[in-house]
Image: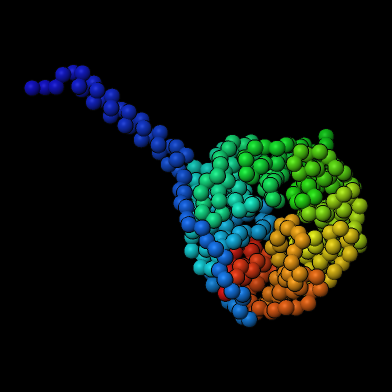
Amino acid sequence: MRPPLRVWGWTAAALALVVVWALLWRGSDAAATDSTTAAPADVPTGTPAGAVSAAWSAPTTPTGGAVRATVDGGRVVVGDEHGVRALAVDSGEEAWRYTRANARLCDWTLVGGRVVAVFGTEDRCDEAIALAVDTGVRAWTRNLDLRPDAVLSSTEGIVLATSPTGVLTLDPVGDSIRWRADPDEGCSFADGDVGGAGVAVLQTCGGSVQVRLLDGYDGTPLWTRDVAGGTTLAALAQAVVVAGDDGVQLLAGADGVPLGSPLGEAAGEPLATGFGTSALVWADGTLTVVDQGTGAVSWRTPASGLTAGTADRAPLPAGTSVPVPEGNAVVLRDLVTGDELQRVDAPGLDAGGLVTVAGPVLVHQLPDRVTAYR
């Protein structure tokens, strides 16, 4: 006995729904997302040995070729074309990952124990996500509308997206957009960075170059200063560092007045970071440690790179040391005096990288890869 026609109809409808569901799933963000999580990790205990060698290495693909801080606690974050991964700092083993096969990773940054990453699905960068650095657990997701060449930077409580046509600040905790700012008419932004002093942008207008500082939380203009050319800049806790035709110069966060003399030629890609109330500037093969408030030089030493810094944390305990890459060694130096406290032989360190000490591990960060020495 054949089933009634209505049964055949119901069966056909059910099969059609299954096919439609399968097609929708295959084209969905959920199907294209590969996401894992992990238990929290502590920083390994101990200190670097007197001689270390490369224990592991991993490629990474930061936007614009700029070297960035990638270490947070016991994790090292790396990016690729479609997402981010967190690796165990001591072994290099993958702890968690978040990748999207149907989207490209536009850029990412570390801030406040979170990885904030922006993805693009078409010709814009249109979705941001925040993940816990420790575990990879998602904190939030939101839509954005950024140019494909937007570059992210961050400081505690602020994520900055910079592009030639404007800047945008995002709350890394609550995911809200705080404010946007455009360059002056006929101008464009060549670079931008954020620190305790505020949001600093390098604005080019025809043949002139200006540094503009805006309040980090509401975008209020604080000051504008003409500079003799300009290629890169960094915003620190109390000052702005700009590299231009006159060399690398500190500008006071309060009013933009130059602090002290230029700190070296702006050849290559100078690096600058904040370490407590000090500014550490690597330029022309020399590391210069400067007081951010006065511009007074504390000490100088030949170097092949820079410490990754400690954001804007201040004050720091007495006897704080900073790791300084010096050729085939990393020297831990007293932040105040520059005196050598420990020397760690580490062959194979390329110039221009950032160094972080995580217990017994030295992490060397370059624009295209991260290498851990132990």
Tell me the residue at 78%/39% (across/down).
Answer: 219
Instruction: Say left or right for 316 vs 250.
Output: left
Instruction: Say left or right for 369 vs 135.
Output: right
Nearest the viewer among 275 and 350 is: 275
**Location of residue 324 by image quarter:** bottom right
> What is the quadrant of the N terminus in the image?
top left
Q: How many labels does the image show?
A: 0
Up the image or down, 320 lies above or below 146; here it is below
Residue farthest along the bottom direction in this orientation: 50
Tell me the residue at 61%/79% (across/down).
Answer: 49
Where is residue 160 drawn, in percent x and y? 70, 45
Where is residue 98 drawn, in percent x and y? 50, 50
Up the image or down, 113 lies above or below 92; here it is above
Up the image or down, 218 lies above or below 362; here it is above
Up the image or down, 335 lies above or below 223; here it is below
Where is residue 250 drawn, in percent x and y? 86, 57
**Location of residue 18 by image quarter:** top left
Tell me the residue at 70%/60% (across/down).
Answer: 310
Nearest the viewer among 60 and 38 is: 38
Where is residue 110 drawn, in percent x and y? 63, 53
Tell me the residue at 75%/41% (across/down).
Answer: 217
Nearest the viewer among 97 and 226 is: 97
Residue farthest along the left direction in this orientation: 1
Residue farthest along the top direction in this orientation: 5
**Location of residue 45 by image quarter:** bottom right
Say whether residue 8 is visible.
Answer: yes
What sort of colour scheme is used for the picture?
rainbow
> What is the quadrant of the C terminus in the image?
bottom right
Instruction: Say left or right for 166 vs 88.
Output: right
Say whether residue 271 is visible.
Answer: no
